Amino acid sequence: MTITPAILAQLPLTDIDAVIFYKLDEITTDLICCDVAIAGRVWTFHEESKGWNDLTAHLSALPGFRADWYEAVVKPPFEATKTVAFDRR
């Protein structure tokens, strides 16, 4: 999936309920993913998607967004991890 401005427009900051980053062990590499909960729907993205940096920049504008999410999710390597970066609930 390409993360376009049209996709970001469907994720208004005022409507986002939660943002969770997690890492999947893919044997030789890890894949960082992000779930965005909004209006009862969960949008799933991953770091290999075109526009990933635009998504993380957009989400970082949420009040109280956990700025250290990346460091929290990448360690330890090759283990599944989960980090709640934002939770309005």
Image: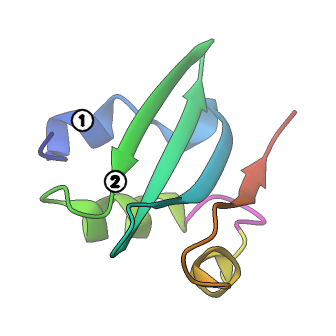
Amino acid identity at mark 2: His
Query: Reading the chain from its start, which is encountered first: label 1 or label 2?
Result: 1
Residue ID for mark 2: 46
Residue 62 within the magenta-colored segment of the rendering: yes
Instruction: Write the residue at 54% across / 68% down.
Output: 60
Q: In this orientation, which residue lies closer to the viewer: 59 or 75?
A: 75
What secondary structure is the magenta-colored segment mainly?
loop
Q: Quadrant of residue 8?
A: top left
Instruction: Write the residue at 53% across / 41% down.
Output: 35
Instruction: Write the residue at 30% across / 36% down.
Output: 9
Query: Horizontally, is 38 left or right of 50 in the view?
Result: right
- Return the mark for residue 7: 1
Residue 42 within the magenta-colored segment of the rendering: no
Part of the protein shown in magenta: 61-65
How many neighbours does mark 2 have within 10 angstroms: few (below 14), some (14-19), or many (20 or more)? many
| The C terminus sits in image quarter | top right
| The N terminus sits in image quarter | top left
